[in-house]
Image (spheres, grey):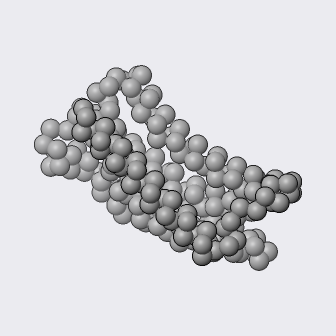
């Protein structure tokens, strides 16, 4: 137990030192990143920042509830045995989701730039395309996985937990549907309201 505490403390210290070094470097190189006390009294600026941060918070809370809420509901309804199946399904979904997230991250600056220039039609078109393209990127990976999930899990784990294949299939189907939404969220964030 002592080694575990040392490991946790070491990880926390290393992470904190690296983060503080990054913040110190940014504050040294970019003066615009320094905190100006006068900005705290500017109500209009605070409202605009809060509106922007509010949509990001909405997105993060939704993702957190989707991920952890699913695990809690599975534990309550099916029991702790479902954790193994859910963990496998989550890992499979995360791998398929990686490519689509890269596309969304690449399009995000262009969406914001288009909205900033006043080209809302272009921004909305990009947002719509982002959802379609991210779904199309996941589709060639997800469909074969959905079709052959049981045999893949047997190949991977030899004895997969009961219900793992079905859960993985449902999570991949949910991922396909979920991929249609990030473009809309990017549009809301770019617009600020």
> Does residue 128 appear left or right of residue 3 in this picture?
right
Q: Determine which quarter of the picture holds residue 119.
A: bottom right
Q: Position of residue 190 (x, y in %)?
A: 70, 64
Q: Residue at x 60, y 49 (%)?
A: 59
Extreme residue in the left direction: 158
Q: Nearer the viewer, residue 184 or 14?
A: 14
Quadrant (top left, top right, bottom left, bottom right) of the N terminus: top left
Give left or right: position of 76 versus 145: right
Q: Residue at x 28, y 27 (%)?
A: 81
Q: Residue 62's spot in the image, x, y percent?
A: 58, 43
Is residue 77 found left or right of 26 in the rendered image?
Answer: left
Residue 121: in sight, yes or no?
no
Seen in the picture, residue 29 relative to 130 is either above or below; the reply is below
- Exactly how many numbered labels are in the figure? 0
State the image quarter where residue 76 is shown. top left
Instruction: Tell me the quarter of the image containing the C terminus.
Output: bottom right
Q: Is residue 65 visible?
A: yes
Residue 41 falls in image quadrant: bottom right
Q: Residue at x 34, y 23 (%)?
A: 79
Residue at 15%, 49% (x, y): give it. 155
The image shows residue 88, relative to residue 17, as above or below, that is above
Give the percent coordinates (x, y) of residue 58.
Answer: 64, 46
């Amino acid at each position: 137990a002592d080694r575990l505490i040392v490991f946790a403390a070491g990880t926390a210290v290393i992470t904190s030192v690296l983060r503080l070094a990054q913040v110190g470097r940014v504050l040294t190189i970019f003066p615009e990143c320094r905190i100006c006390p006068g900005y705290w009294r500017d109500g209009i600026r605070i409202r605009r920042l809060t509106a922007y941060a509010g949509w990001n918070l909405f997105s993060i809370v939704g993702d957190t509830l989707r991920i952890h809420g699913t695990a809690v509901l599975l534990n309550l309804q099916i029991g702790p045995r479902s954790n193994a199946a859910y963990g496998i399904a989550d890992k499979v979904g995360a791998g398929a989701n990686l490519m689509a997230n890269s596309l969304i991250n690449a399009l995000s600056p262009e969406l914001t730039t288009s909205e900033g220039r006043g080209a809302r039609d272009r921004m909305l078109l990009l947002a719509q395309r982002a959802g379609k393209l991210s779904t199309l990127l996941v589709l060639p990976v997800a469909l074969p996985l959905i079709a052959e999930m049981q045999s893949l899990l047997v190949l991977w784990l030899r004895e997969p937990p009961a219900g793992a294949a079905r859960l993985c299939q449902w999570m991949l189907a949910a991922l396909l549907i979920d991929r249609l939404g990030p473009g809309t969220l990017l549009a809301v964030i770019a617009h600020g309201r």
